[in-house]
Image (spheres, rainbow, N blue to C red):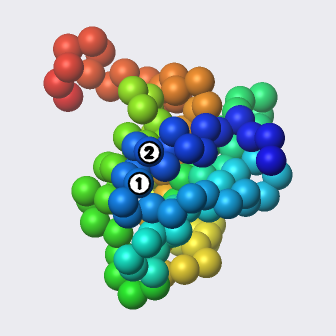
Amino acid sequence: MTSTLPALVIRSRLGLADWAVPTGFGPDGWLFRHRQESGQIIVTCAPYAGIEWVHASIGFADRMPTYGEIKNMHHAVYPEGWAYEVFAPPAEHVNIHDYVRHLFGRLDRKPYLPDFTRGTGSI
């Protein structure tokens, strides 16, 4: 499968001991299954409004992913790049599983939101 996303590099960053060899997912994506738990990470790439976006989700069958697991996914999928977790209004909320968290970021790793620190490094 040809993909925009470097599956084996992502798996290496996730941790070879914890995550199995990825399988193709959709037209441009990968599915990573956790070796010990009933967890998975799905990473896909698609254009929206002229920008290539990467969507990464992590979920487990019986628990919410920890902050550390979400950070690890961020490091693996968006190294040195920006990603965002989106909280939509209830009427527009979409989630097909109760224990999944999602990150969205540009393929080019550039920020999409303004620099709220205005260059100071503090809000």
Tell me if I can see residue 1 in this picture. yes
Q: Amino acid at mark 2?
A: Ser
Residue shown at 61% from the left, 70% from the top: 94
Give the side of residue 3 with respect to residue 101, left or right: right
Estimate the spatial distance between the alpha carbons at disc 1 and disc 2, rounded to whole Å: 6 Å
Of 82 and 33, nearer the camera is: 33
Residue shown at 43% from the left, 72% from the top: 35
Residue shown at 36% from the left, 60% from the top: 17
Which quadrant is the C terminus positioned in? top left
- The residue where tag 2 is placed is 12
How dense is the environment of label 1, judged by Cα within 10 Å: few (below 14), some, or many (20 and up)? some
Give the SS element for disc 2. helix
The quadrant in which residue 53 appears is top right
Check contact, mark 1 vs mark 2: CB within 8 A: yes
Q: Amino acid at mark 1?
A: Leu
- List x then y, in percent, for residue 121: 20, 20
Give the side of residue 68 with respect to residue 85, left or right: left
Of 41 and 35, nearer the camera is: 35
- List x then y, in percent, for residue 34: 45, 69
Give the side of residue 96 with respect to residue 35, left or right: right
- The residue where tag 1 is placed is 16
- List x then y, in percent, for residue 65: 35, 69
Q: Is residue 116 above or below residue 119?
A: below
